[in-house]
Image (spheres, rainbow, N blue to C red):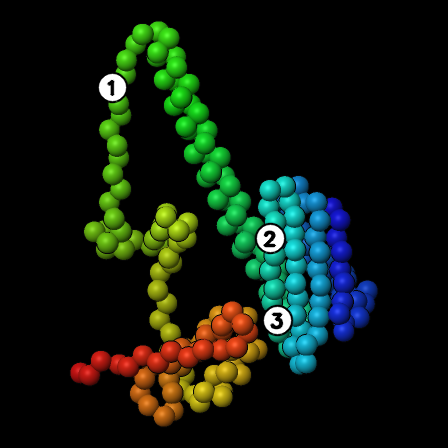
Amino acid sequence: MSTNIKGRNVEITDEIRAYIEKKLPRIEKYTDRIQSLNIVLKKDGYQHRADMRLKAGPLDITAETCDHDLMKAVDMLVDKIERLLIKKADKLWRGRKHKAGKQQAKLRALQEAESGETREPEPVKSKVSARSKGHRFPLDIEKLDVKIFPPEQVTLARMSLDEAAEVLYFKDENFVCFLGDDNPWIKILYRRKDGHFGLHEIALPAE
């Protein structure tokens, strides 16, 4: 495996390189076909950014994380790549399984045609929706290839918009929910694709 670690406004010391290499077995255990692994560490103001691009057979995965602490950014990067590897590997496995099932069905049809035998079609098994079962979690959304996990109860903090922006800026998250200090609405501050933040406000229904 070819591993390339570079720094931009960051000196790649022996300590940093050893720390990263110690984390790599978590990624390597999911595939033995890694052709290249490129990691770039950058410093942007008070933020440290960690980028990774991994090529392994048909897989081409990229991810980026940021944090004010360089080592924490590396930890979050490895976590994110690990999650992506699991998701994409599972998708490839299911695709191959589906393809193998279709090939076996074609082979059986050819064998029956050659022997002159006919076979009663198997009844189609209908899947009962999770709604009728009372939402059993995790809930599979097969069309989108995602799972919905059980809800978690959280307590929303009351903070100003400036405070929420600072929380979101220093976290590797796409949004933060909070209660505004100027009205009783629930506010959602989210990260836009252009790098700036957007705001949604949800009015609570009157009792």
Q: Is residue 84 visible?
A: yes
Left or right: where 49 falls relative to 118 = right
Q: Are marks 3 and 1 in contact (CB under 8 Å)?
A: no
Task: State the mark number for residue 66.
Answer: 3
- Give the residue at the far left of this rendering: 207
In the structure shown, which secondary structural element does the residue marked by tag 2 occupy?
strand
Task: Identify residue type, mark 2.
Answer: Ile
Q: 10 Å neighbourhood of mark 1: few (<14), some, or many (≥20)?
A: few
In the structure shown, which secondary structural element does the residue marked by tag 3 occupy?
strand
- Give the residue at the far top of this rendering: 115
Task: State the mark number for residue 61.
Answer: 2
Q: Residue at x 71, y 56 (%)?
A: 38
Looking at marks 3 and 2 on the same chain, the residue that comes earlier in the sequence is marked by 2
Task: State the mark number for residue 35.
Answer: none
Q: Residue at x 79, y 67 (%)?
A: 12
Q: Residue at x 38, y 58 (%)?
A: 149
